[in-house]
Amino acid sequence: MISTLEQPVEKKQIIQEVEGEVYCPFCTRTVNATLLVAGKRAKSKPGQKCPRCSTSLDAGFVIGARRAA
Ligand SMILES: [Zn+2]
């Protein structure tokens, strides 16, 4: 008997902190920020502020992550 149902594999999601760039919608600039990467998803680490306009980057758009050396 072959089961066609895929059993969800329990995985511990590893969240990594990496240096990256976040687009600030307020000053329309890309600024450096710490990103939280979980799998293929990345988001800005909560609590960070834009160095230019001091707006919270929580709602910022992640441009990309840089690989730590
Ligand atoms: Zn800004």
Image (cartoon, rainbow, N blue to C red):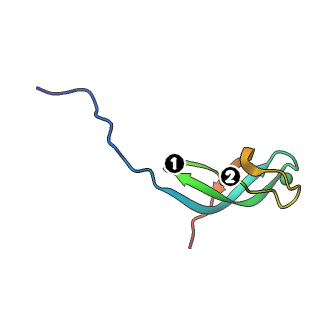
**x and y percent of residue 18 in the render?**
60, 62
Residue holding disc 1: 40
Q: Nearer the viewer, residue 69 or 12?
A: 12
Q: Residues within 10 Å of mark 1 (few under 14, many from 20)?
A: few
- Kindly give the residue lying farthest to the front in the view shown: 47
Give the residue at x 78% y 58%: 31
Q: Amino acid at mark 1?
A: Lys
**x and y percent of residue 44 in the render?**
67, 52
Q: Are marks 1 and 2 in contact (CB under 8 Å)?
A: no
Residue holding disc 2: 46
Q: Residues within 10 Å of mark 2 (few under 14, many from 20)?
A: few
**x and y percent of residue 30 in the render?**
78, 55
Q: Amino acid at mark 2?
A: Pro
Left or right of 37 on screen, residue 50: right
Q: Disc 1 or disc 2, which is closer to the eye?
A: 2
Question: The C terminus lies in which quarter of the figure?
Answer: bottom right
Question: The N terminus lies in which quarter of the figure?
Answer: top left
